[in-house]
Amino acid sequence: MIMKNIKVKDIVKITNGKLVCGNEETECINFSKDTRIIQKDDTYIGIKGEKFDGNQYWKEALEKGAKCVIVQDVEFTTEDTRKYKNKVIIKVEDTLQALYKIASFKRDLYNIPVVAITGSVGKTSTKDIIANVVAQKYKVLKTIGNNNNNIGLPFTILRLKDEEVMILEMGMNHFGEISLLSKIAKPDICVITNIGTSHIGNLGSRKNILKAKLEILDGSENPTIIINNDNDLLHNWYEKNKNKYNIQTYGIDTKSDINPANINLGIEGSTFECEIDGEETKINVPVAGEHFILNAMSAILVGKNLKLNREQIKNGIETFELTKKRMDIFELSNGAKIINDAYNASFESMQASLKYLSNFKDNRKIAVLGDMFELGQFSKELHKNVGTEVFKNNIDILICSGENAKDIVAQAETCGMNKNNIYYFEDKDKIIEFLKNNITNNDVILFKASNGMKFFELADKINETFRK
């Protein structure tokens, strides 16, 4: 794939901007919104947010080596244009809208497949495994980390150089957000992992969450849609729309286009068998948990659609690595195991993590759980549901912190968990002291909460303590 760059004159035209100074034939190759990490010859886009205005730093961007800046609400003096006459300055009405238009223009320069991934949970891990599979045959550009919003996705597209496939993650908190991303990215393949309860406080119901996730279809006329058929709402949607769209399904419990057989769930990974290219294939998933088998199934379907062979698909699944803080498992110096799954939390991801923890039959199982955010009026009910899951999965010790986590504690005790094995701390730092004094070499400790609770810091501190 030949790299296709955008010229200044393209940006001026598509944004209806004004070229304050500079050469309109200048090529804009790399884009940045952060003067702290800007590189020589970058194009800087000043993004205006609620609490921060990147347009104020246009001079700093140029001084640090940027060759072009795109800004709004800035008045340039004669001295400015004289001083920066060898640079490019473009003034637009709205830099955020300009970003969208530039990214959309860049995407249209490339006739390559775009795979978009959304869902209530599992977006990033599904993106990682799909990207690793596709990379066995093609050069891949993928979303880094969870840069899946209205700023992260356009800047991901603007990184496109000579890649042959894009794998893009799409997140949302409200209606309209995924529609915007889809119209920029124009995906050929849309993967929906599940419809759960994440952001239900903003959207009001799971049916509304389904509606918001289906906005992923807005940017393409006839995309291939790959869905988790085990999810109740996605399954019902499939049954009503299977003759309207090109939908492909995967699932463990529900008969689908592909289903795994002979599943073996292990502590460090899992195995299953699946037919690929007409041949029954045994696949080793390097991350444990039933949900990662589902992720692998979605990757198989994407691989098939992109004409990968059996060995390429198998190797891509078996060699993928998770983004850090997602099921990040490590051993302490005393032999205890830590499961750091504290990047984010919803009821569904809590449920999956507790189910995984329950597989450690010969160990003492400790769950360190905190608040789940953005649940609105459903918060109490869903935190209580987590308490039920704690009891159902035979967790030995429950440790909680956070205002909403009190409902986890209360429900676990109501279900019948021994209250002597339940601990609540107003100050989450006290969890460290408790664990330091009580961890044994036979323990497996899960850390799980919404990102804002910063439970991943607790996991890191415990690791540092036992390293000394």
Image (spheres, rainbow, N blue to C red):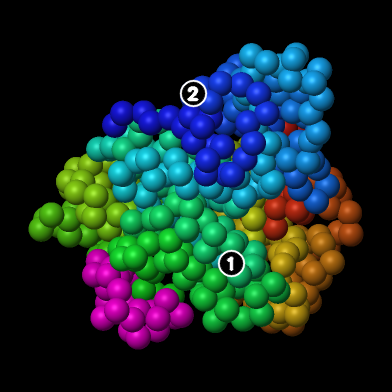
Observer able to see residue 233:
yes
| 137 displayed left or right of 40 | left
The stretch drawn in magenta includes residue 251:
yes
Residue 144 in percent (x, y) is at 53, 40
**Callout count:** 2
Q: Residue at x 89, y 54 (%)?
A: 427
Q: Residue at x 42, y 76 (%)?
A: 234
Measured in 3D between alpha carbons, the distance from the residue under mark 1 to the one under mark 2, in whole angstroms, is 35 Å
**C-beta proximity under 8 Å, tags 1 and 2:** no
Residue 218 in percent (x, y) is at 45, 66
- Of badges 1 and 2, the one in the foreground is 2
Q: Residue at x 61, y 21 (%)?
A: 22
Foreground: 364 or 286? 286
Say which mark, if any, is on residue 176.
Answer: 1
Q: Secondary structure at mark 2?
A: loop
Q: Secondary structure at mark 1?
A: loop
The boundaries of the magenta stretch are 232-259
| 448 displayed left or right of 145 | right
Residue 20 versus residue 335 in the image, above or below:
above
Please state, as top left, top right, bottom left or bottom right, where the C terminus lies in the image.
top right
